[in-house]
Structures are given as C-alpha cells and as structure tokens.
Amino acid sequence: MDLKESMAVNLRRIRHEKNLTQEDLAARADLSMRYVGAIERGKVSASVTVLGQIADALGVDPCELLRQKSS
C-alpha cells in the first residue's frame, strides 16, 4: 500500500472514529468537501500543508494519517 492509499484509509477511519462528516472535517480544515472526499478515495495526494491542516482538524499527529498497517 502506498502512502496515498494509507492516508485515505487512515483519514476515513479516524474521521469516522470522531463522528465527523466529510463536510465537518472540510470546514474544520478550511478545505473543500470535494477535496477531502478525493483524498479519502485516494484520487489525489495531499500536500504536507494539507496533511497538517487535516491532522490539526482531527486533533491527531500527522504521522497517524500516514501510518502504514504492519503485515
């Protein structure tokens, strides 16, 4: 799994754990809901700036969004 896919999976999981909609997260991170959805689907790669905005909005360390599952 590449980092884009890992971020997509982790973002969706963490967002759900915090009971946030894509719209809620987008508003907190000052991003468009469409862009958040594209990141969650692995269609686009987020810049490190956006990674930081999303991590701040979720209240997690940015590395949590990139962590790859151990095999």
Image (cartoon, helix red, strand yellow):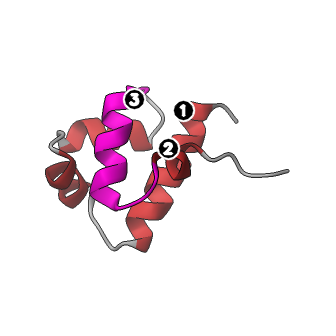
User: CA–CA distance between discs 1 and 2?
Assistant: 6 Å
The image's mark for residue 4 is 1
Q: Secondary structure at mark 3?
A: helix
Magenta stretch secondary structure, dominant: helix
Of the pair 26 and 58, the residue shown nearer to us: 58
Q: Secondary structure at mark 2?
A: helix
Of the pair 48 and 3, the residue shown nearer to us: 48
Q: Amino acid at mark 2?
A: Ala
- The residue sitting at 35% across, 40% down in the picture is 52
Query: Dot 2 corresponds to which residue?
Result: 8
Spot occupied by residue 7 in the image (x, y as percentages of width and height): 52, 42
- The residue sitting at 42% across, 59% down in the picture is 60
- Circle 2 packing at 10 Å, graded few (<14), some (14-19), many (20+), is many
User: CA–CA distance between discs 2 and 3?
Assistant: 14 Å
Spot occupied by residue 69 in the image (x, y as percentages of width and height): 72, 51
Instruction: Say which label, 2 or 3, has the lower sequence index.
Output: 2
Q: Amino acid at mark 1?
A: Lys
Q: Say whether residue 20 is magenta.
A: no
Q: Are marks 2 and 3 in contact (CB under 8 Å)?
A: no
Q: Are marks 1 and 3 in contact (CB under 8 Å)?
A: no
- Asked if residue 35 lies left or right of residue 61, the reply is left
Q: Are marks 1 and 2 in contact (CB under 8 Å)?
A: yes
Specify the segment rendered in magenta: 44-61
- Circle 3 packing at 10 Å, graded few (<14), some (14-19), many (20+), is few
- The residue sitting at 44% across, 26% down in the picture is 45
Q: Say whether residue 48 is magenta.
A: yes
